[in-house]
Image (cartoon, rainbow, N blue to C red):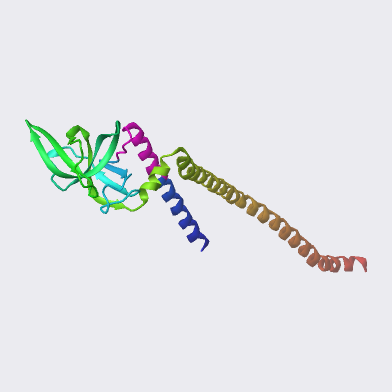
């Protein structure tokens, strides 16, 4: 039972470490990628408005895939792209409602499923971050947003990593002590064997002397008569 609990504990610790490592990669990749995390061609994104409701809601986490060739995009695909809103460059996730091709320059007319009109600015190839894969995790975007903060990174990443390190250090020390004890036990056994051997030898000598005493007395008797 104790061994099983130890195995389960180790598995949980490794899962925490892997999760912490994954989030760390996402955080650093989003920092180096201009606020967009890339992991093996996939882009996890947090929905920040209700413009695509009911397809997904604010706070959801969706997974997009990077697109190398925009010709693979079609009407009704949901894409994430850079756009300008109120003078700020932001990420937007809307559905393609039309595709324009002017002198070889392709642009995409987009609209949120919850919006009555198309977006003012079309999305061009250089603006596109990725295409929605259909994967959606309800409410998980809020967790990812928290993990990207300094407090979230400290609480959910650094502390578990530190606990894992100290736990592994504790297991290492226990192992060293156990091995040391095992290496000392043969020495203790040899000493015990030597002690017992000496005791048995002395006991045998005493018995021999006790047994020899009557014979010696008998041998001495005729000479005394």
Vertical placement of 210 versus 96: above or below? below
**Residue 90 occupies which quadrant of the picture?**
top left
Residue 22 belongs to the span the image colors magenta? yes
The C terminus sits in image quarter: bottom right
**Along the line of sight, which residue is nearer the eye, 125 or 29?**
125
Residue 48: percent from left, percent from top: 33, 44
**Along the line of sight, which residue is nearer the eye, 17 or 31?**
31
Seen at 31% across and 43% down, the residue is: 45
Looking at the image, residue 52 sits to the left or right of residue 185; the answer is left
Vertical placement of 87 versus 185: above or below? above
Report the span colored magenta.
20-38
Give the prevailing secondary structure in the magenta stretch. Answer: helix
Furthest residue to the right? 225
**Along the line of sight, which residue is nearer the eye, 125 or 157?**
125
State how many labels appear. Answer: 0
**Residue 107 occupies which quadrant of the picture?**
top left
Seen at 87% across and 65% down, the residue is: 220
Looking at the image, residue 208 sits to the left or right of residue 13; the answer is right
User: Is there any visible trace of residue 69 in the rendered image?
Assistant: no
Seen at 36% across and 47% down, the residue is: 141
**Residue 198 occupies which quadrant of the picture?**
bottom right
Residue 75: percent from left, percent from top: 13, 46
Furthest residue to the front? 116
Vertical placement of 157 versus 182: above or below? above
């Amino acid at each position: 039972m104790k061994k099983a609990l130890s195995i389960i504990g180790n598995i949980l610790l490794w899962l925490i470490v892997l999760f912490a490592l994954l989030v760390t990669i996402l955080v650093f990749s989003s920092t180096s990628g201009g606020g967009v995390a890339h992991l093996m061609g996939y882009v996890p994104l947090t929905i920040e408005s209700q413009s695509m409701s009911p397809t997904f809601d604010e706070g959801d986490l969706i997974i997009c895939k990077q697109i190398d060739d925009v010709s693979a995009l079609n009407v009704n695909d949901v894409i994430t792209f850079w756009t300008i809103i109120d003078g700020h460059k932001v990420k937007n996730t809307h559905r393609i409602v039309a595709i324009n091709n002017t002198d070889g320059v392709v642009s995409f007319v987009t609209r949120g499923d919850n919006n009555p009109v198309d977006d003012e600015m079309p999305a061009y190839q250089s603006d596109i971050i990725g295409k929605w894969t259909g994967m959606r995790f309800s409410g998980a975007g809020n967790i990812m947003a928290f993990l990207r903060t300094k407090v979230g990174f400290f609480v959910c990443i650094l502390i578990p990593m530190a606990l894992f390190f100290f736990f592994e250090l504790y297991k290492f020390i226990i192992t060293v002590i156990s091995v040391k004890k095992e290496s000392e036990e043969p020495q203790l056994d040899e000493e015990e064997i030597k002690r017992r051997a000496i005791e048995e030898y002395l006991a045998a000598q005493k018995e021999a002397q006790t047994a020899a005493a009557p014979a010696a007395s008998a041998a001495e008797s005729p000479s005394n008569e």
